[in-house]
Image (cartoon, coloured by chain):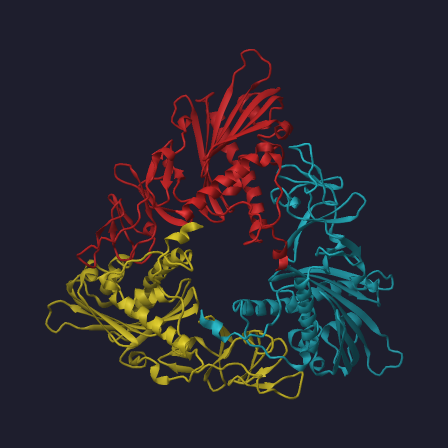
Chain colours: A cyan, B yellow, C red
């Protein structure tokens, strides 16, 4: 169809992500003594825990004839392929080939560096040496002063749509008016900082309207001072720092939250969305925990709906892209876009 | 698969359509005070009516970040994007950008020329100036001496399949024997006329068998004189002129109909089919109206079934095309094919 | 997605098959006096029987406007197209064009050479002269000393996956432990023979464990001597010769079977699987027949499951292919792979 003739040359939301990076592959609590398969950056990965509880990630295709290892058997710390019975250790080396006695050195599958931290599974997808110092800090996920609720979502849209959504919270007023958005969010002044791998957008809202979710969770039913920082650490880790308290009340309690969003490309046009909400108030109050556990995915579903609607629109123009106009609020999102593009370019250049 | 080796080089039913043309986007009666989305030539278009009833068509992707405007809110005569709240007027210009005070000139979406006439919505898809004189004449749709029944269908096949189906009515004897076809249709003599934008195929059937639908609607249960003209006006408007009366009876009543078929490409491999049947007899007889309102889409569904079966066959050969043989009855259809191809080529050359 | 960077250059399971070969198009018993449509090598084919019972195969698209002939009417020995009524004889020549009197020589559809033998329909898909001597021998399908049970399966994976599966029966120990596999299959010594069109892999298992299906069908519940030959005749005919008897018993009965597997590409990524099991014992015992008729497709479904899991994995890498390691048991499968590749290359060179 001739819509192609209206394509802009300027690229929009990118589709490709860097491999030599840490991605969140899931919540630690969801992995046990069974084989599960999950695509990360288009690669099939087989996950399981060893007898001592250590988490393992092997490429989910047997080096012999491409059978997904996740269809096989977990035997002790090893995986036996369901097709011809090759047994692989957790380092990916073949330990046994039933149809022959010698085991070639090349008979092995890739074992991905996998780190468990903050209740998250961090996987390194590239073939360069994994640099553990690149895992973003996330102290509130392990701190007894903070309580965490968690969940997993899936999106039929490219990951970058959520990366940029989370860096421009002006959308809260329109996409989330029934939960965390109010009219004053969009007009609040913002400042942006960045470095080579991260972007921070700060948004201060004083004497602002308390949105519905704040009234329910914090009991803030008057005007509030709301301070929000959207922090992105490449390639897909977000911390939304959210502090709120009653406006002008002496000694008013500060309610603090860290909303953690882990956006991991599944395939080019789909993404995993692993999230956690931590808070430092009423940490033993299960009613508040339930409010966030049930309320947060409803809010995030609105972001996913918007992203999927946009994906359906733009993917029809591939390999072109329809015209697009940047606004002032796009400073943060565009900075993140440039970081991703630069990391991808660096890998192709290497 | 190596079927590719049997491809003919001669192109068959084309996939591409010209943009600088009027297409029917729907029936006027189906559009009201809400936002609807419809793809035309692959472009997403958002339709709505203003407070004074005037119909509007905007491209259905926000210029900012591609969000479908049809997911937003209709506010007065304007549309507010659901994502970041930009308000667009019916001319496509941004009237408000909530996150900033200045409104760049470029912050606008395309507003398509849209004309309401004959109970149809006519949209101009190109970027050249819309030429209203190119809208085909359709007096019977507005004439109180004629009564109209209407409906909408959808086809998972390229539009040109129906454009050519409607210009070779020899298929009536085989595809529609239970409704409007009889054995004598296929063998009736035809004449063909054409100009740069239209094709007319005339088919005279005297002393012919009255097909089932004619018996029911007109009470013609003996031999009939049937005169039929298939008229195509590029890029997708068809008038099937159908006159019938009892053979050899002095002063026999002439029953006249205009079957209007508006074939509008939705995407490359799918099409909208907006139809109307007008008649100049028993115009207040609701039984006859119901007969056509319910019977016509059953007949058209047979054309759609055939077109979809052909589409499934030929799309498997893309970008090639299987061998194809033209017959004498294809004079009209091939002329229409050439007109479409020529209009497309002219746009690419411009 | 950048998984492409890990592609191996070495090709794996091929997607393309030679056309100038006999393929099994179905079981003879399933074809009668009606039009059926089946894709073979991506080509739509219309099958039917003439009044004298002879089977016919025509390309399933009308030469005029691509309508599937299988949507038409079987009239005597001929097929009338449902769209414009052209009547084709079983040799593919047009016998009647209702809209005109002259019948152009070119108004014909391809009639495929079709042979009925062994209860199978053999179709020749190429345009070179069909060479009947290339049909593999299959005497057990017509021999009154042998009894046959049959069935048809479908696979959403490239045909070659099954061709190679059937030539490396070491997988029986892992994929089919509940039916025809036992632990000693994988470690049994094998020998391989081949010529330009066929491959034979022999596997002897003496004093072996009797697998569950053998106990049920043959009553062999002790140790057995099992002799198995996997024979492949290009492009997709397999005979698994299977002989078993009780170990070390004087005059023990030999139970012989020929498992016939006909693997026919449907499209590039899907295949038909027509199978038959013949045996030379208890040939009138319906209980044993039912055991094989119901049990065999359950075993084959395990092969299909594995093949479809592999297809899903490897097709995500197209046009690349992930790394793959060959083992000693792959001698037979790789030989078959080379035969297919060589036949395809010869056609492209011709």
- Residue B276: tell me if it is visible: no
Q: Is residue C149 left or right of residue C312?
A: left
**Which quarter of the picture shows residue B282?**
bottom left
The one nearer the camera, B52 or B39, is B39
The C terminus of chain B - image quarter:
bottom left
* Residue A334, image x, y percentages: 67, 75
Position of residue C159 measured from the top left corner of the image (x, y, whole percent): 49, 43
**Identity of the residue drawn at 34% across and 65% down:** B162
B127 to C258, vertically: above or below: below
Give how far across and how far down residue C203 sits, in percent: 57, 27
Q: Is residue C146 above or below residue B176?
A: above
Q: Nearer the viewer, residue C232 or C292?
A: C232
- As rendered, which of B20 and A148 lies closer to the eye? B20
Q: Residue at x 32, y 51 (%)?
A: C69
- Position above or below: C146 against C323: above
The correct choice, above or below, for A84 with respect to B290 in the image is above
Outermost residue on the front side: it is C349
């Amino acid at each position: 169809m001739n819509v192609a003739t209206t394509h802009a040359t300027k690229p929009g939301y990118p589709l490709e992500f860097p491999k030599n990076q840490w991605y969140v592959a899931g919540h630690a609590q969801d992995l046990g003594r069974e084989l599960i398969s999950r695509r990360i950056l288009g690669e099939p990965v087989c996950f399981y825990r060893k007898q001592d509880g250590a988490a393992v990630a092997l490429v989910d295709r047997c080096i012999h004839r491409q059978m997904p290892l996740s269809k096989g058997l977990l035997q002790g710390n090893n995986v036996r392929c369901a097709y011809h019975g090759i047994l692989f250790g957790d380092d990916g080396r073949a330990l046994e080939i039933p149809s022959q006695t010698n085991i070639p050195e090349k008979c092995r599958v890739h074992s991905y560096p996998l780190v468990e931290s903050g209740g998250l599974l961090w996987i390194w997808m590239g073939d360069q040496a994994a640099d553990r110092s690149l895992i973003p800090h996330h102290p509130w996920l392990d701190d007894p002063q903070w309580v965490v609720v968690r969940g997993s979502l899936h999106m039929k849209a490219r990951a970058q749509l959520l990366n940029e959504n989370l860096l421009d919270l002006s959308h809260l007023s329109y996409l989330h008016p029934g939960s965390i958005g109010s009219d004053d969010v969009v007009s609040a002044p913002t400042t942006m900082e960045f470095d080579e791998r991260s972007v921070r957008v700060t948004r201060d809202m004083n004497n602002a309207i308390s949105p519905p979710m704040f009234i329910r969770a914090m009991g803030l039913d008057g005007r509030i001072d709301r301070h929000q920082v959207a922090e992105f650490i490449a390639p897909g880790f977000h911390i939304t720092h959210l502090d709120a308290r009653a406006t002008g009340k002496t000694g008013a309690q500060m309610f603090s939250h860290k909303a953690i969003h882990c956006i991991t490309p599944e395939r080019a046009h789909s993404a995993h969305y692993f999230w956690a909400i931590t808070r430092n108030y009423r940490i033993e109050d299960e009613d508040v925990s339930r409010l966030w556990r049930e309320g947060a995915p409803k809010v995030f579903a609105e972001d996913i709906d918007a992203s999927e609607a946009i994906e359906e629109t733009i993917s029809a123009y591939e390999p072109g892209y329809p015209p697009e106009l940047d606004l002032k609020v796009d400073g943060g999102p565009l900075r993140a876009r440039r970081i991703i593009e630069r990391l991808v370019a660096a890998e192709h250049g290497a």
